[in-house]
Image (cartoon, rainbow, N blue to C red):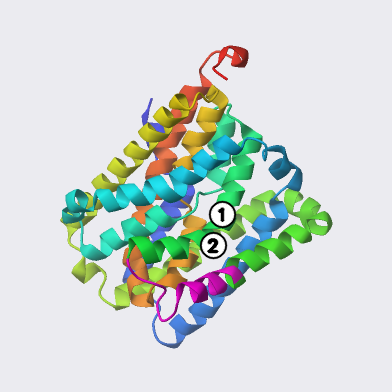
Amino acid sequence: MALPRFAPDHFTLALVGTVVLASLLPASGPMARVLEVATTGVVSLLFFLHGAKLSRQAILGGLGHWRLHLSIFAATFALFPLLGWALRPVLEPLVTPEMYLGVLFLCTLPATVQSAIAFTAMARGNMPAAVCSASASTLLGIVVTPILVGLVLGRSAEGGSVLGAISKISLQLLLPFIVGHLLRPLIGGFIHRHAKRVKLVDQGSILLVVYSAFSAAVVSGLWRETPLPALAGLLVLCAVLLTLVLTLTTWGARALGFAKEDEITLVFCGSKKSLISGVPMAKVLFASSTVGAIVLPLMIFHQLQLMVCAVLAQRYARRPEHPATQPA
């Protein structure tokens, strides 16, 4: 009965299939260069659509709970990097050095928007605050992630400065997002009516970027240099990291006296890491030959967070509906 809750979703299966395809038939030479231009375009389109989908009313509705937002941002941009750095002596031997760089990169990323909001809704949490925090996390990550990469990984963007990386990421992600949001009054209705097609664009964009990243990594010898025990170790490492963050955000919410709805929002928004933001950022911040190994931990963590949080959200949803009795 519990098995379906832990089964991979269709998008995860598509991700696995994309990695297999890139491993067997990697793009190289002129095709790789064409693919690089195409991925830049589709990622910009992806963030344009995200900006157009985002309701300004939903964001403004959740702005007031500043203690909750600060707690979520602290979990996303402080707790994760600190755990990745502190656990390095213990966990790095489980994987290759390149993989652990990917784990540290994962720790610097912003929260994901869709799944954080979806799980908060499923668990009957504070939805306006979840929309506000998850959306703000995505935008903050454009500036904060390159800075954290420099601090935590001890390196700046490939071939440039942190400021250069922020500028490049802003042009590729932030500018389309802002333009899409400004055009929301004109195209928001169309996007809402064609939500399923927009979702296909979302997922197709990520699959194309993943194929491009893994193609470059495979051509550079990713699988020749990645032993099977390291893949098993990476799964254990991601599980440990997720468990610690879920536990600490739960304890933190209760120590701060948050209502149960706010606890849910902190747990689901503070424990997520964005695949949609992470893959294009990795392509800007790291050399093409290393991006595959860098995003591999993110892909595994992404699936783990979906499976575990789906079960956790169902558990929260079964609680009695007496919000007035929860601690203030």
Q: Position of residue 49 (x, y in %)?
A: 67, 59
Of 9 and 177, which appears nearest the observer?
177
Q: Position of residue 326 (x, y in %)?
A: 55, 16
Residue at 31%, 78% in the rendered image: 219
Residue at 42%, 34% in the rendered image: 249
Is 235 colored magenta in this rendering? no
SS for dot 2: helix
| Amino acid tagged 2 | Ile
Q: Position of residue 59 (x, y in %)?
A: 69, 44
Q: Position of residue 250 (x, y in %)?
A: 42, 30
SS for dot 1: helix
Of 191 and 239, which appears nearest the observer?
239
Q: Which mark is residue 44?
A: none
For the residues bearing labels 1 and 2, Cβ distance under 8 angstroms: yes
Residue at 53%, 63% in the rendered image: 143
Q: Which residues are magenta?
A: 154-170
Label 1 crowd (10 A; few <14 / some 14-19 / many >=20): many
Note whether residue 296 is visible.
Answer: no
| Amino acid tagged 1 | Thr
What residue would you read off at disc 1? Answer: 138
Specify whether 63 is left or right of 35.
right
Q: Is residue 192 above or below residue 65?
A: below
Residue at 30%, 62% in the rendered image: 101
* Res. 122 image quadrant: top right
Specify whether 263 is left or right of 248.
right
* Res. 100 image quadrant: bottom left
What residue would you read off at disc 2? Answer: 142
Quadrant of the image containing the N terminus: top left
- How far apart in space, not on screen, are marks 1 and 2 (Cα)? 7 Å
Quadrant of the image containing the C terminus: top right
Specify whether 186 is left or right of 55.
right
Of 268 and 23, which appears nearest the observer?
268
